[in-house]
Amino acid sequence: VVLVVDFGAQYAQLIARRVREARVYSEIVPHTMSAETMLAKQPAAIILSGGPASVYAEAAPSFDSAVFDAGVPVLGICYGFQTMAAALGGKVGHTGTREYGHTNAELTGESCLFAGTPADQVVWMSHGDAVQAAPEGFAVTASTNGTPVAAFENRERKLYGLQWHPEVKHSDFGQKALENFLYDAAGIEPNWTSESIIDAEVAKIRERVGDAQVICALSGGVDSSVAAALVHKAIGDQLTCFFIDHGLLRAGEREQVEKDYAAGMGIRMETHDESGRFLEALAGVSEPEAKRKIIGREFIRSFEAAQKALVAKLGSEGGDVKFLVQGTLYPDVVESGGGEGAANIKSHHNVGGLPEDMEFSLIEPLRSLFKDEVRAIGRELGVPEKIVARQPFPGPGLGIRIIGEVTRERLDILQAADLIVREELTAAGLDLEIWQCPVVLLADVHSVGVQGDGRTYGHPIVLRPVSSEDAMTADWTRMPYDVLARISTRITNSVPEVNRVVLDVTSKPPATIEWE
Ligand code: XMP
């Protein structure tokens, strides 16, 4: 394992991803972890991430510098580079010149980090502080106009540092530098592949589950589908999936999921139509958090009912239902503080939360994976491309895309508009480029229009196409005008209650992706 030490901000996750793209397994650990604990994980290498602080600020994130004496290869990046310099007797300070964005770096000495890259290269910088003098025994291997010590190394001690961010795509040879560090400086074999992950997870699941029964709440989305496929590969029909239809799905979604699963997955799936229960509970409610809570609560009730029915059906010989599969991903784990092998239901799950008092052990086979890795595993497992390539869809569904009270009539309007948008995006080949495109009905807003021969007083539909890597931040997608025009024409022609289509041109932050 390669440990990526997190000094704050988003840098550590990006580095961990790039290391895995180099087919080397990586894990993120907090900067507060002791050298002893880190070394007990027997890391093949350690990478120190960038971070927002100054190394000499009073509240600077600490780091146990005993790591530098352990003989483990270490690469310090940006703040991590400065931390390494300060800990080993170098000098770090304000240079007066800040560097942000594209910068030219010039290689000033031979370095295995830069093997196979040009002497002059574009790198991406973001710093106010700089290393002013390298520690004794370190060779300076690159510099920029504003930063004479932009990279250094001590090959004997296997310590390397870069002021710029190799994990950012704007650094031309960033990935190459990371790979040179991993393969050459640290001597790691790249063997982290979808196949090896699947084999390891299948073996683990078999051993844990034995002949017990396992259930899974399936949303039809990528994560729960791939998790279910992985568990199914391990234990076959000991797995039962529940698909709860809460009536807030998109047009044709339930049928599509049922068909895809029957055809492509071979997994036993039970659909439970609970839409009546949800709509009744949502009547008269328009406050977003209230809606979310109601949907979460009704989901729990539906899930419990499905589980009870299954236990009754299996009878006394059916084996215990002891395990629950969840499609928790690595970013969820990192964001909720790390913890290992949770035994009971925790906060991050799909719809508002599963019952706290359900005595299940969790099976979370995707806990150490990023979304793109989950997709790769899904493909390897033969999960149909239609499912693997699906865009994210929120657990509360259209319930949080109708601004105002949720009623059956309003759901019909939104489903019709949403279907048109999905058809047009697919026809234009934009499904992969766009992260997701919520379609939102402003149900309490009216505006005047003229349709056919007369005045109308209808609702606006909002298109919210966004581009993102992980949904933490997003930008609105610059979609072709002709596709927007086709969507607008089709919606206003065929959904009579809608007389206006508007485009949301806000990034996240300040807006969120969903409107509620
Ligand atoms: P926001 O609106 O917070 O959304 O920018 C970020 C991503 O999360 C999805 N989302 C949800 N997914 N249950 C989910 O499973 C939810 O309650 C939920 N709320 C938002 C949203 O679609 C986007 O991909």
Image: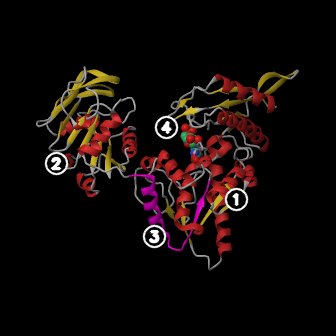
Q: Horizontal and vertical percent for residue 118?
A: 28, 27
Secondary structure of residue under mark 4: loop
Q: Which mark is residue 469?
A: 4
Q: Are marks 2 and 4 in contact (CB under 8 Å)?
A: no
Secondary structure of residue under mark 2: helix
Residue 467 lies, with reference to residue 302, above or below; the image says: above
Secondary structure of residue under mark 3: helix
Badge 2 local density, few (<14 within 10 Å), some, or many (20+)? few
Pick the quarter of the image with the C terminus: top right
Q: Horizontal and vertical percent for residue 382?
A: 56, 54
In the image, residue 197 lies in the stretch drawn in magenta: yes
Q: How far apart are marks 3 and 4 (CA)?
A: 35 Å
Q: Which amino acid does label 4 sit on?
A: Glu
Q: How far apart are marks 4 and 1 (CA)?
A: 32 Å
Badge 4 local density, few (<14 within 10 Å), some, or many (20+)? few
Name the residue located 49 percent from the left edge and 35 percent from the top edge.
473
Q: Which amino acid does label 3 sit on?
A: Glu
Q: What residue type is labelled 1?
A: Thr
Q: Which of 17 and 193 is in front in this view?
A: 193
Q: Which of 424 and 412 is in front in this view?
A: 424
The residue stretch that appears in magenta: 192-218
Q: Are marks 4 and 1 in contact (CB under 8 Å)?
A: no
Q: What residue is pinned by disc 2?
A: 69
Q: Distance between the residues labelled 2 and 4?
A: 36 Å
Q: How far apart are marks 2 and 3 (CA)?
A: 39 Å
Q: Do the residues labelled 2 and 3 touch (CB within 8 Å)?
A: no
Specify which label sits upstream in the sequence, 3 or 4.
Answer: 3
Q: Residue 271 carries which label?
A: 1
Specify which label sits upstream in the sequence, 4 or 1.
Answer: 1
